[in-house]
């Protein structure tokens, strides 16, 4: 739905120094201090220096440009202005998102603009708000919520007039000019399809829109943040190691779990254990890799890639023997004892269903081996 930099300047001051000397019959004494330049002389010298040496353009700190971009993204969306959305991106931007056959990418601002034109045409009353954004170096992670009425066609999905609403999240990598050079966006389009009746099954309730400007949380880079990042990495590693004990030890007893592609939420270690076992049974060769992990105070944000072969029942879906590669993003909240108290997962059930061949035809099985994992961009060079 959405594809969605400080130089120091110097002022040159001219100081006029008078020539002083002693006559032949005089004993040189201490030289008097030079007279202070008059305001007129100072202004004249400054004007001359400015005229001959142009000052370099001022550039705000990157974090200030990032804050402005976060606010501008919300404003451009709510104005339904595809050009203003695209203007927040570098001309060579690469944007990616999980699609029906796996990770999909497109390049350039024309693609960004065209995609949003179609989006705003299909949902002309769309409201798009952001509760918070996280900033670390050149990276910004922006949470967002949308509400809209599906009154226009969107691809093959004909207008239904139904109300829709989803949670989503975007990871932006910024260049030194404050433009987004890479965008990874996660949301569940199947939720919209279910809300409109285009897909069968229960749909997640339409979320309420947050109010006000996004809260901006800047990473402090403290040892405590680093400790939580390592704890998150260890939890994900436990999936591949099939170590349920380590996985559960990372969680608070009342851990709250929100998977935004699912109709309901879960709570507690028991539910977490049941979900763990179901995934291990469905994908006995399950591998989970945290490709990008960032700490922000008591929260950790992780981009995650899961691979496996569907060899066991997954809910009502019987084994298909098909390989899948799934990308998702988790926001983990840590409590005072550094146990995870909440997990919010942004993923695409459409990506899973497509790769398992549940969307019609057998294209998913053929496409899975050729998929690319979501890249892990390197930070912009420091200036």
Image: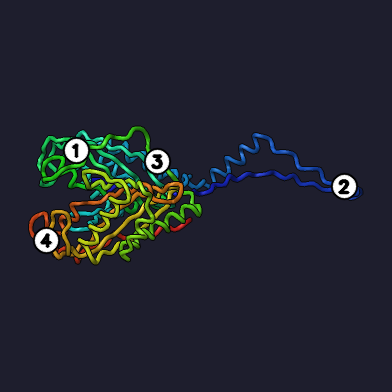
User: Could you tell me residue 377's position as x and y percent?
Assistant: 36, 59
Instruction: Say whether marks 4 and 3 touch (CB < 8 Å).
Output: no
Pair 4/2: label in front: 4
Instruction: Give the labeled residue for mark 1.
Output: 164
Label 4: which secondary element: helix
In-front residue for pair 105/176: 105
Label 2: which secondary element: loop
Distance, label 4 to label 2, CA atoms, is 97 Å
Distance, label 2 to label 1, CA atoms, is 89 Å
Q: Examine the rendering and report whether any part of residue 169 can be seen.
A: no
Q: Quick check: 240 above or below 340? A: below
| N-term mark: 4 or 2 | 2
Instruction: Say whether marks 2 and 1 touch (CB < 8 Å).
Output: no
In-front residue for pair 23/97: 97
Distance, label 4 to label 1, CA atoms, is 28 Å
User: Could you tell me residue 125's position as x and y percent?
Assistant: 21, 33
| N-term mark: 1 or 3 | 3
Quick one: label 4, few (<14), some, or many (20+) residues within 10 Å? some
Give the numbered dot on residue 29: 2
| N-term mark: 3 or 2 | 2
Pair 3/2: label in front: 3
Label 3: which secondary element: helix
């Amino acid at each position: 739905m959405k594809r969605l930099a400080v130089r120091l300047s110097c002022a040159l001051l001219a100081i006029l120094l008078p020539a002083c000397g002693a006559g032949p019959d005089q004993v040189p004494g201490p030289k008097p201090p030079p007279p202070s330049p008059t305001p007129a002389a100072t202004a004249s010298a400054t004007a001359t220096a400015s005229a001959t040496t142009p000052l370099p353009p001022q550039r705000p700190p990157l974090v200030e440009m990032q804050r402005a971009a976060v606010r501008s993204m919300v404003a451009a969306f709510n104005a339904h202005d595809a050009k203003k959305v695209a203007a927040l991106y570098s001309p060579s931007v690469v944007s990616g998102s999980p699609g029906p056959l796996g990770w999909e990418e497109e390049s350039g601002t024309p693609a960004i603009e065209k995609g949003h034109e179609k989006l705003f045409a299909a949902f002309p009353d769309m409201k798009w708000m952001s509760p918070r954004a996280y900033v670390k170096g050149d990276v910004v992670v922006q949470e967002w919520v949308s509400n809209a009425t599906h009154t226009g066609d969107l691809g093959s999905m004909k207008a239904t007039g139904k109300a829709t609403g989803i949670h989503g999240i975007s990871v932006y990598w910024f260049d030194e000019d404050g433009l987004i050079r890479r965008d990874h966006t996660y949301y569940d389009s199947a939720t919209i399809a279910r809300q409109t009746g285009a897909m069968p099954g229960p749909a997640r309730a339409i979320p309420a829109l947050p109010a006000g400007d996004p809260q901006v949380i800047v990473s402090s880079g403290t040892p405590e943040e680093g400790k939580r990042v390592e704890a998150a990495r260890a939890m994900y590693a436990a999936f591949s190691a099939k170590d349920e004990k380590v996985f559960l030890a990372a969680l608070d007893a009342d851990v709250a779990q929100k998977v935004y592609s699912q109709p309901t939420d879960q709570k507690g270690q028991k539910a977490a254990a049941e979900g763990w076992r179901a995934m291990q049974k469905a994908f006995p060769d399950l591998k989970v890799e945290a490709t990008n992990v960032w700490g922000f105070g008591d929260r950790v944000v992780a981009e995650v890639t899961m691979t496996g072969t569907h060899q066991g029942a997954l809910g009502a879906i019987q084994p298909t023997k098909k390989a899948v590669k799934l990308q998702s993003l988790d926001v983990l909240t840590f409590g005072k004892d550094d146990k995870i108290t909440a997990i919010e997962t942004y993923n695409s059930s459409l990506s899973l269903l497509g790769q398992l061949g549940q969307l019609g035809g057998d294209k998913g099985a053929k496409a899975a081996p050729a998929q690319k994992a979501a890249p892990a961009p390197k930070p912009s060079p420091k200036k």
